[in-house]
Each structure stands twice: as C-alpha cells, then as structure tokens.
Amino acid sequence: MPLRKHNVYKDYQCFFITTSCFEMQHLLCDERCFELILENFKFYNEKYKAKLLAYVLMVNHIHFVIYFEEKNYLSDYMRDFKKYSSLQIRQYLAEKYPENWKE
C-alpha cells in the first residue's frame, strides 16, 4: 500500500508502520518466516542507517516503529524490505508446501 501524503512526512525520521500480507492471508505461518523478516530488518537497518525501536510479528501482518538516524529513507526502505521479504517468504512457502502453492 502506498504511503498516503508521503510528501508531508519527508522531514520526519520516526514512523509507526503496519504492513500486511496479500488479502490478509496467514502467510507468516511459522518461525522461519519470522526469522526471514528479522534478518531483513537487520540488513535494511544497516543499509539505510535506521533503528528498529519496536516490532510485533503476526501471522498476517507486522507492526514496527523505525527511526532513521540521518535522513528519511522510508519509501526506499519499505520498497526494498517488502520486495525482498516477500520473495524470500514465497520461495520458502513454495518449498515447504508445494502441494498448496500456486504461482
């Protein structure tokens, strides 16, 4: 989902974010999915000089609070984080549940 009124927020550096799975499906179904998300948080926090202040991971969505230390990279961060995380989770689910997976 695009960031509403994102120009209003370009001068801010701390954000509460919620992002969900497609059609609120329960795709974050086990510990490995959560591990992938946490690994990606670590990678993109380093890349965009951000701090993850808090997070909640659920089976169909996540919440987190993020602070950018230097510059607001929220749009780039979310684009990269969601794109790569979804790719990894789709690949994992396709391997684990091939009988239920449709591309």
Image: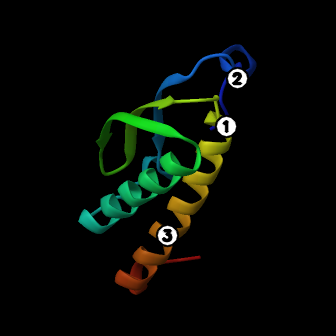
**Amino acid of disc 3:** Gln
Q: Earlier in the sequence, mark 3 or mark 2?
A: 2
State the residue position of label 2: 6
> Which residue carries the number 3 mark?
88
Secondary structure of the residue carrying numbered label 3: helix
Q: Do the residues labelled 2 and 1 touch (CB within 8 Å)?
A: yes
**Identity, as a three-letter code, of the amino acid under mark 2:** His
Q: Looking at the picture, tell me which residue is in the foreground, 16 or 42.
A: 42
| Side (left or right) of 86 relative to 99 | right
Q: In this view, does 45 lie above or below 89?
A: above
Residue receiving disc 1: 75
Front label number (3 vs 1) = 1
Give the x, y percent position of residue 49. 54, 41
Residue 51, position as x, y percentages in the image: 43, 36
Query: In the picture provided, is 15 more to the left or to the right than 29?
Result: right
Point out which mark residue 3 bears: none
